[in-house]
Image (tube, helix red, strand yellow):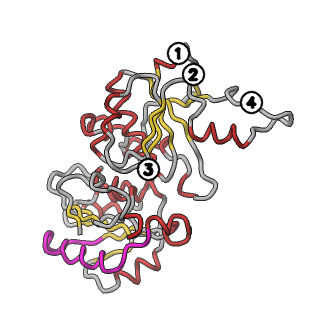
Amino acid sequence: MKPIHVTQDNVDQFLCVRIFGGLGNQMFQYAAALAQAKRLNAHLLLDIVGSKRLDHATFGLAQFPITADLWDQSGLATPTLLGKLTGRDRKKRKHGANWPGERFRHDGLDVNTDIFKLKTGSYLNGYFQSEDYFAAFEDDIRAAFDLSAFKPILDPQSAEWAKSPQAVSVHIRRGDYLHDPKTLKIHGILEDDYYNRAATLMSKLVPDCQFLIFSDDREAAEALTHAWPNRIVMPEADRFCDLSLMSQCSHHIVANSSFSWWGAWLDRSKDKQVIAPRRWYTREHMQTIYIDDICPKGWILI
């Protein structure tokens, strides 16, 4: 990826998307933008916004065979006499206010169909957490997120477990959901009851299934699933290994997390069973956020 300077004169050649959040969120943002860039035959640029608060929010898309360059913002903000950006300039950079073309922002989780009316020269800012944003370009998205292209170093035994036709990936998300107050207030923690009901249902749908437990808190995962039959708490690995192994499983129990959403979606099997939580956020946020567009049709919500 190379940095590209955008001006009023050449902005119509490009489409730019703000990349922020964890890997799953970054994948949704890229997928939605790539679909629009394909539709418009535009050159896709990324505006990468890092996070000092969350380790897992470091930029991860470069590990995939993506086709995009970087928006070069150098020279677009006015430095102070000390050579540093003012708070106002930093905010402009963070939210794309320096983009010389039109800006499209959507803070909700419902599908905003206005995105399909965008023209070249636009800047996208949002979560875009639905396959409806890129369903027409599914093959392109799968190619963009082809984990085999860089071949993450997988534990041989883990890879064998994932290849079983009875393998069920189970994602137990804790980490920032538990320890970061801001994230906890929004997402909350899925109760043990969800996972136990999901495991019971999956055992009926897939007899003799093998549960492969992926978690950023192996101690919590061990405690939650200790009574489950045929379960293996997977060895600690980086996020790309976990995502690759999840996608190789035949069936899935996802958390209220865009990361395991992608683990299930990237599984190409037409016969997969996917169980997802009906409650994606805390009760307070569920009263104000529309979430019906998040999970694809055919996934079982409990």
Q: Position of residue 196 (x, y in %)?
A: 28, 79
As for residue 195 lying within the magenta part, the answer is: yes
First in sequence, mark 4 or 1: give its number: 1
190 vs 57, nearest the viewer: 190
Amino acid type, mark 3: Asn
Measured Cα–Cα span from mark 2 to mark 4? 17 Å
Q: Are circles 4 and 3 on residues that touch, CB within 8 Å?
A: no
Query: Relative to 145, is 164 above or below?
Result: below
Query: What range of the chain is rendered magenta?
Result: 188-211
> Which residue is the site of mark 4?
78
The residue mark sitting in front, 2 or 4, is 4
Q: Is residue 54 visible?
A: yes
Q: Is residue 237 left or right of residue 246?
A: right
| Identity of the residue drawn at 31% across and 34% down | 140
Left/right of residue 28 with respect to residue 272 in the rendered view: right
Sooner in the amino-acid sequence: mark 3 or mark 1: 1
- The amino acid pointed to by label 4 is Thr
Does residue 157 appear in the picture of this structure?
no
Side (left or right) of 78 relative to 23: right
Q: Amino acid at mark 2?
A: Val
Please tell me which residue is depicted at 40% across the width and 80% down the height of the picture.
222
Do the residues bearing badges 1 and 2 touch, measured as CB atoms within 8 Å? yes
Task: Bin the neighbour count of mark 4 within 10 Å (Cα to Cα): few under 14, some 14-19, many 20 and up.
Answer: few
Q: Which residue is mark 1?
A: 10
- The residue that label 3 is drawn on is 25
Mark 1 burial class by Cα count in 10 Å: few <14, some 14-19, many 20+: few
Q: Secondary structure at mark 2?
A: loop
Q: Which mark is residue 6?
A: 2
Q: Locate residue 293, reporting x and y percent.
A: 28, 51
Q: CA distance from mark 1 to mark 2?
A: 6 Å
Going by the image, does 60 lie left or right of 246?
Answer: right
Residue 256: x and y, percent? Answer: 37, 64
